[in-house]
Image (cartoon, helix red, strand yellow):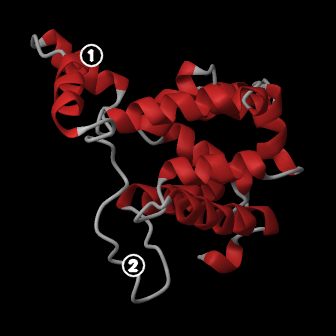
Amino acid sequence: MFERFTRDARATVKGAVVRAESAGADAVTEEHLLLALLDQEGGRASFALAALGLRDRRASLDAAFTEARRRGGLTRADTDALAGLGIDVGAIVSRVEGAHGEGALATGRGGRRWWWSGHRPFTPGAKAVLENALRVALGRGDRFIGGEHLLLALAAKPGVVADVLTEHGATYGAVRRAMYGPEADEGRAQAG
C-alpha cells in the first residue's frame, strides 16, 4: 500500500512518527497523523486545512486534544452519552486527578513496548485511517494516496480527531468541499 503514497503522504506518516516520539507516546495515533498533516506545505490537504482556518488554530487543536487525553480518550459524544445516564465525566476526572495527579487518565503513555524494535507501532485507529485513505482514494478513482485522502479518512473516522475537526468547523463535507469545490457534493448526490 505504501508504494501508492505520494511524497506528502509519506512525509505525513514520517512526521506522525516523529511527533509520537517527541511526545513520548507509545504508539502513533490519529492525532499524530492530523498534526503531521498540519506541518505539510502544498497539496490539497494543506490548502483545505488553511482554507478551513485550522492552520491558524493549532493552539486550539492542541488544547482540544489535551482535554480529550485528560478524559481518557473519550469523545464528546461519549461524555454526552454518559451525562445522559447521570455520569459526570468531568467530576470523575477531577476526583481521579485529585487522588493520582494531573493527567492520571491521559491516554498514550504507558509501558514502552516499542523500545526493542526501535519503531513505534501505529494504534489500530491510525492503521484504520491509513486503510481508509486507500478506500477514499479508490472511491475517487485516484491511483495514489495523498495527504487529501489521509485528511478525508481522519475526518470520516468516528473518534476524538473527527470530533475535534468538527468542533473547528472541519466536518467531512467541509473538508471535501475545501479540497474539491462545491461540485464534490453535486457529484455525490448524482451518484447516490
Q: Looking at the picture, which amino acid does disc 1 mark?
A: Asp
Query: What secondary structure is marked by label 1?
Result: helix
Nearer to us of marks 1 and 2 is 2
Snapshot quadrant of residue 16: bottom right
Residue 114: give x, y in percent of width and height.
39, 78
- At x 43%, y 72%, the residue is 121
Q: Is residue 147 left or right of residue 134?
A: right
Q: Looking at the picture, which amino acid does disc 2 mark?
A: Trp
Q: Residue farthest to the bottom?
A: 116
- At x 53%, y 61%, the residue is 20
Q: CA distance from mark 1 to mark 2?
A: 34 Å
Snapshot quadrant of residue 76: top left
Q: Nearer the viewer, residue 33 or 180?
A: 33
Residue underneath mark 2: 114
- At x 18%, y 15%, the residue is 88
Q: Could you tell me which quadrant the N terminus lies in? A: bottom right
- At x 71%, y 25%, the residue is 186
The reply to whether discs 1 and 2 touch (Cβ–Cβ < 8 Å) is no
Q: Is residue 137 above or below residue 95?
A: below
Residue 153: give x, y in percent of width and height.
55, 47
Q: Is residue 78 left or right of residue 61?
A: left
Q: Residue farthest to the right?
A: 42
Which numbered tag is attached to residue 80?
1
Kindly tell me whether residue 180 is visible in this rendering: no
